[in-house]
Image (cartoon, rainbow, N blue to C red):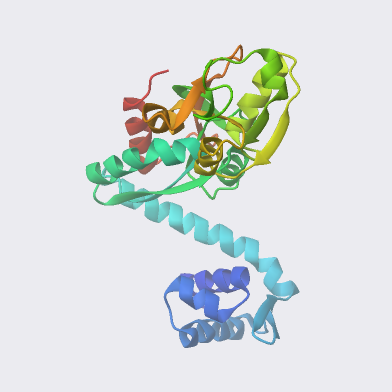
Amino acid sequence: MAITLRQLDIFEKVARCQHVTQASNQLLLTQAAVSMAIAELERLAGAPLFERQGRRLLLNDRGRQILPEVSDVLMKVRMIEQFLDESIGEPKGTLNVGASTTIGNYILPAIVAEFSRLYPKAKALLHVGNVQQIENALENGELDIGLSEGLPHISSLNTKPWKNDELVVVVGKEHEWAHKKKASLKMLKSAAWIMREKGSGTREIFEAAMEKKGISFFIALELGHTEAIKKAAEAGLGVGCLSRMAVQRELDNDWLVEISSPLDLRRTLIVLTRNSEYLTTLLRAFLALLKQTQDC
């Protein structure tokens, strides 16, 4: 029996996709080449490894039995290839970087651009989501590094402080608070708040600050994007609470008005990595760039 690594790679991809077409697209091969590789592997195995149901290919019991072993072999081969590439000493390849919304929209684009400039053979792909989404993706191995503006939830991840930030309470210039530019605890309690969704770092910091003051609150609008919250506040639909870096342009142009309050809305932006003794050359290079912009 002479099974090749290419056949194992195709087997794993078809097993995950359950379709020859999707697997061939991801592997950049023709459907015929993928089908021939599966047929040859099944011939060498002495029996089918998939059940055909229309256009779907589902693993049978023999296929399910070997899939973990195949994935393990391929992972070891990729580790060997990565090690040989990195032994040259120059960062190369693709780094998957995850960031919660404020960081991903207002800080990281410039850093990612600088990373590409410094290392022409490397690139960082930026994935933006809320804090819980970024942490879950990092833990599951979908991301190589995460940057978060919220409280950490997964204890197995390493966390390091990176930058200081603060949230600010903002209203539109026609709002009743805009003239005094100050809100009491009673005013905060009665406000119609425009907030991010559950799982957002901004939402968590706001809720913690309100709870610390013993204030219950009413959320009039829940929106999934910072820009939508800013526009809603500008339109006079309620009171927002967002990162200063996200609203500085609107404050400078008097589109929004900052409202002082008794709330402690300071926070620390953090860097998240998996607990591993080995950091790749690519990851070390990105961490070094982050350290240059660190203020914690």
Q: Nearer the viewer, residue 236 or 205?
A: 236
Q: Is residue 185 above or below residue 50?
A: above
Quarter of image, res 221? top right
Q: Is residue 103 above or below residue 95?
A: above
Q: Is residue 214 above or below residue 104?
A: above
Specify whether residue 216 is in view: yes
165 on left or right of 92:
right
Query: Number of marks in the image?
Result: 0
85 on left or right of 49:
left
Residue drawn at x 71%, y 15% is 186
Quarter of the image for the C terminus: give it. Answer: top left
284 on left or right of 242:
left
97 on left or right of 64:
left
Residue drawn at x 67%, y 20% is 188
Q: Position of residue 124 (x, y in %)?
A: 37, 47
Specify whether residue 4 is in view: no
Residue drawn at x 57%, y 57% is 72
Quarter of the image for the N terminus: give it. Answer: bottom right
Q: Position of residue 95 (x, y in %)?
A: 40, 48
Quarter of image, res 169? top right
Q: Position of residue 15 (x, y in %)?
A: 62, 71
Residue drawn at x 49%, y 33% is 277
Q: Position of residue 109 (x, y in %)?
A: 36, 42
